[in-house]
Amino acid sequence: MDNDPTTAVTAVLIDAYRRWAKTAEGPAVRELSLSVIGYLAMSTKATEDEIPRLFEMLRDAAITNN
């Protein structure tokens, strides 16, 4: 993570999303989700069809690290 700024930013963004999602309500949940999805799509150059797989990979990584 220290050698890859994109990985570091992604980790911070995901951590912030996790924290905010616990208390977010209404439109804030949707806006936070769209921000994360937009960032992942932009930073990985993923297509719309690839986004669900990216979330699966993030979930799997979080499960094995926590």
Image: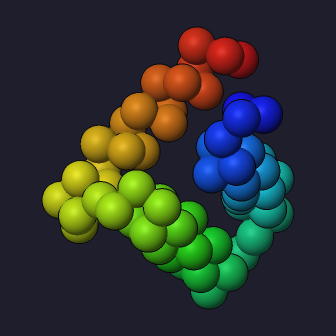
The extreme bottom residue here reads 27
Which is more toward the observer, 38 or 9? 9
Q: Is residue 37 visible?
A: no
Residue 65 figure quarter: top right
Location of residue 47 in the rendering, given as x and y in whole percent from the top left corner: 23, 64
Residue 51 located left or right of residue 58: left
Which is more toward the observer, 43 or 65? 43
Residue 23 located left or right of residue 58: right
Q: Residue at x 58, y 20 (%)?
A: 63
Specify the color scheme: rainbow
> Where 10 falls versus 43 (above or below)?
above
> Where 7 falls versus 64 (above or below)?
below
Location of residue 26 in the rendering, given as x and y in whole percent from the top left corner: 64, 82
Which is more toward the observer, 26 or 35? 35
> Where 66 falls versus 20 (above or below)?
above
Location of residue 48 in the rendering, given as x and y in whole percent from the top left corner: 23, 66
Residue 25 figure quarter: bottom right
Q: Residue at x 50, y 33 (%)?
A: 59
> Where 5 falls versus 45 (above or below)?
above
Location of residue 46 in the rendering, given as x and y in whole percent from the top left corner: 30, 59
Q: Quadrant of the C terminus?
A: top right
The extreme front residue here reads 3
Which is more toward the observer, 58 or 2? 2
Residue 5 located left or right of residue 23: left
